[in-house]
Amino acid sequence: MYNRVKSLTGAEEMEMKKIGFIGLGVMGLGMAANLLKGGYEVAVYNRTPGKAGPLLALGATELESPSAIAQTADVVITMISNDNAIHDVYWGDNGIFAGARSGVTLIDCSTISPTLAKELANAAASIGVSFLDAPVTGSKPAAEGGTLVFMVGGPAKVLKGVEDVLLAMGRKVIPMGPNGSGSIAKLAHNTIVGINVVALAEGMAIAASGGIDGSAFVELVQSGGAASKAAEMKGPKLLEGNFDVQFSLELMLKDLRLSSVLADSLHVPTPMLEATKSLFQIGESLGLSDLDMSSVGQAYEQWIGRKLSGRSDNLH
């Protein structure tokens, strides 16, 4: 199933795996594009038609079902929005498990429950297929720029065999332990991300209410002990009121809900997680689900009656 491709020097050949990629949303589109740019042969599928155009222009092939993808690929990567969709893509009548050959490696990069990740691994093993849960950190810009970080649950030997594929889409691969560990790490990680975004908005609300210019305050945050990726990536969005999606509020709330269930199962007290989840639920109730997760800051703007930028265009 491998394609033999000459190296740039022509002096030797390397084997290029055939890749199947399922899920062409905000993240998946950029990830699949980087595989194509890396020289891989890529077949794609998306549950909603019409998303594959940019990838077809780069040389991808579009197939009619997850099963068809699994029949032709050496490695199948999924980037799906939620647990229910994962069930359809893997266990459906034309799902991955219906078509997967023995020896194929399945890599799920979605953010799903650890329980489901383990179920996928067990189902894969029962048909002679390898499985890795390999969610990512990094939003749309990192997916497009190939700078994602993969946190991986699964056997080290399996990971070693596909590390080149992951590094075509990202800058780092971090093994986390057995199957399910990648999912646990992702939920713990996104708990911190959600808390940091809310903390930034809350601090900006205090500063704006006290008459501080938002740009100066965000510069201060980025320069001191409160510095974070949230301040770096979401500070400008909160200042400009530009909530084009890098990672949606809806998906962050989904992750926080999954993390809350996980924490309960592990008997871990999580007061900050629960408060943050509630704030994102308020954002959902305000109709912000389809906007970037930083739009949760609009709740604070309503409460304080002014923009987080601290500018004079108050809301009242």
Image (cartoon, helix red, strand yellow):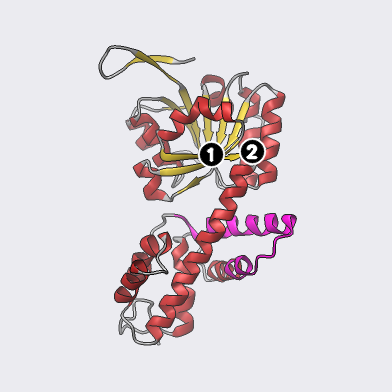
Asked whether 236 or 67 is in front, the reply is: 236
User: Which of the image's four quarters has the C terminus?
Assistant: bottom left
Asked whether 111 or 72 is in front, the reply is: 111
Question: Which span is picked out in magenta?
Answer: 247-276
Q: Residue 304: x and y, percent?
A: 45, 84
Q: Residue at x 67, y 28 (%)?
A: 124
Asked whether 109 or 286 is in front, the reply is: 109
Label 2: element kind: helix
Q: Which mark is residue 168?
A: none
Residue type at mark 2: give it: Asp
> Dividing the picture into quarters, in which one does residue 144 lie?
top left
Q: Residue at x 47, y 62 (%)?
A: 293
Comes first in the chain, label 2 or label 1: 1
Q: How far apart, in angstroms, are the residues tagged by discs 2 and 1?
A: 10 Å
Q: Residue at x 63, y 34 (%)?
A: 90
User: In this rendering, does residue 39 appear at all?
Assistant: yes
Q: Residue at x 65, y 25 (%)?
A: 98
List the residue tagged with mark 1: 47
List the residue tagged with mark 2: 88
> Dividing the picture into quarters, in which one does residue 232 lie?
bottom left
Q: Are marks 2 and 1 in contact (CB under 8 Å)?
A: yes
Label 1: element kind: loop
Left or right position of 229 against 265: left
Q: Residue 305: x and y, percent?
A: 43, 85
| Looking at the image, residue 110 lies above or below residue 246 | above
Residue 133 forms part of the magenta stretch: no
Q: Residue 168: x and y, percent?
A: 40, 33
Residue type at mark 1: give it: Arg
